[in-house]
Image: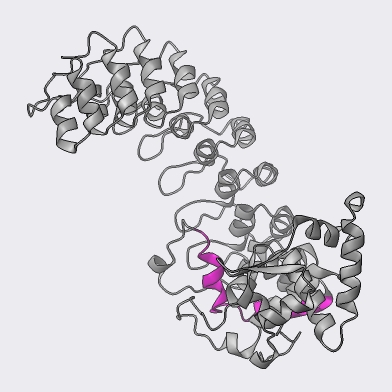
Amino acid sequence: MDGFGWGDAYDATIKRIKAQYGDKSRLGMAALMWVSHAERPLRADELCHALAVELGSPDFKASNMPSVSTLVSCCQGLITVDKEVSTVRLIHLTVKEYLSTPPDIFFSRPHATMAEICLSYLNSKPIKAISADSSPETPDKPFLEYCSLYWGVYAKKELSDNARSLALDLLQEYDGHISIKLLLRQFETLDLESFGPIIHFNGLHCASFFGIVDIVTALIEKGGHDLNEEDFCGLTPLAWAAMSGHKGVVEILLGRGEVDPDKPCGTGETPLSYAALHGHEGLVEMLLRREEVDPDGPDNYGQTPLSHAAKQGHEKVVKILLGREEVVPDRPDYYEKTPLSYAAQEGHEGVVEILLGCEEVDPDKADCCGQTSLSYAASNGHEEVVRILLGREEVGPDKQDHYGRAALLYAAWYGHAGVVKILLCQEHVNPDKQDSRGKTPLSYAAWCRHEEAVKTLLGREEVSPDTPDYYGKTPLSYAAQEGHEEVVKILLSQE
């Protein structure tokens, strides 16, 4: 950087910022701290509110807010506002590099300071006055969402005594705080509206979610918390820590005799299930050392920790679990889907090969709809997984499910021409095989406008462009019905 003179130029700019009169110097350096250490790009209104917060004050004074133009001026050109998205950014990546190396020269304990500011804001009277039943959309309080999502991130990185005190003030009476909605709605799988009131998500749940060891310890020592308490969606503090991969918090909680290490949540997942689902192999090993933990315990849908790990492609976790004799590698869930089916469906080649290495695994096992691992892999276009499965003599490449659909039909239906080619090379695959409604792979490909799949199928002499289904409709009539002109031309050229 210095070779280009940037370091010297930035040195001079920082000196000018610090030499400004009145509050301009403080505002300039504070704005640079926020923009350079933000967890995501800050909107201009968020930054203005952040700079108006008085540490530890129960009040928020809008009169303290600087204007955007004032901030840009105070930073002497080092920040700019992207008008299209209203975010504030540094003028160049080299500015961030300059401000971050070496650390703490320009800003004293920036993460701790930012945690203190976020916590002061969340503890302020205007925020605490917001009802937990209110909409989380608060345009008049633009800094609320950022504080809710990231105070714990900053505190985990660097916790000052003041931040610790402010965090305990917040978390001692956290149940019902509006920030809970903002924190949890980032999880797309959590339909908050379906749960009704968001209750029982207390301070210990929150600290465990963020993984702040010191805060978790302090809350436990203060007492008053049921360490096995379930929140509104049935999760315990241990489950949140296991899900989020916070080893230190898991160790603390497992060290408490009253904590149930295998307690299932409302949908039956245990802390082990969550650790396996998210690929936290260290936590999986830690939990498996407890005798109370069932390595193969199913949830309410019959899915085991192995199923969860296989579906997500976590090879190390799969190997750890398979190392336990209690784990059944081919155990189906309530839909008769096995860990292999899930791995094949998602295209996790490594997990597929690991599971196929287990003698107990049937590579051609069908689920409740008759679909096999091969048909799932074909449906999703996972060519390498298809090749791996076809390499097993037990796998029937033309096996039909309960609807008469084989792997080739699924590949054609979803337009995976590469998989279609692979399957057509199999001796026992009928390229014109009809399903229970008489529709052929070509019918599905034509219907869904998959031109490459149509061309590939028509390359086989056994495939007829005029084969009618049980309703008398041909591939050509399906393509014409849907207005797929190019497919119609391809089919007509075969007549």
- Whether 449 is drawn above or below 360: the answer is below
The quadrant the C terminus occupies is top left
* Magenta span contains residue 179: yes
Task: State left or right for residue 475 relative to residue 401.
Answer: left
Question: Where, by quadrant of the figure, is residue 276 drawn?
Answer: top right
Question: Does residue 226 appear in the picture of this structure?
Answer: no
- Whether 442 is drawn above or below 59: the answer is above
Image location (x, y in percent) of residue 216: 72, 67
Residue shown at the point (51%, 80%) measured from the top left: 139
Task: State left or right for residue 290 relative to residue 305.
Answer: right
Residue shown at the point (49%, 41%) measured from the top left: 304
- Whether 452 is drawn above or below 240: the answer is above
The residue sitting at the left extreme is: 472
- Whether 123 is drawn above or below 102: the answer is below
Image location (x, y in percent) of residue 2: 91, 53
Task: State left or right for residue 138 relative to residue 487.
Answer: right
Question: Where, by quadrant of the figure, is residue 195 drawn?
Answer: bottom left
* Magenta span contains residue 322: no
Q: Which residues are magenta?
A: 161-187
Question: Where, by quadrant of the figure, is residue 221 drawn?
Answer: bottom right
Residue shown at the point (14%, 19%) measured from the top left: 467
Q: Main secondary structure of the magenta part?
A: helix
Image location (x, y in percent) of residue 107: 86, 70
Image location (x, y in percent) of residue 278: 59, 46
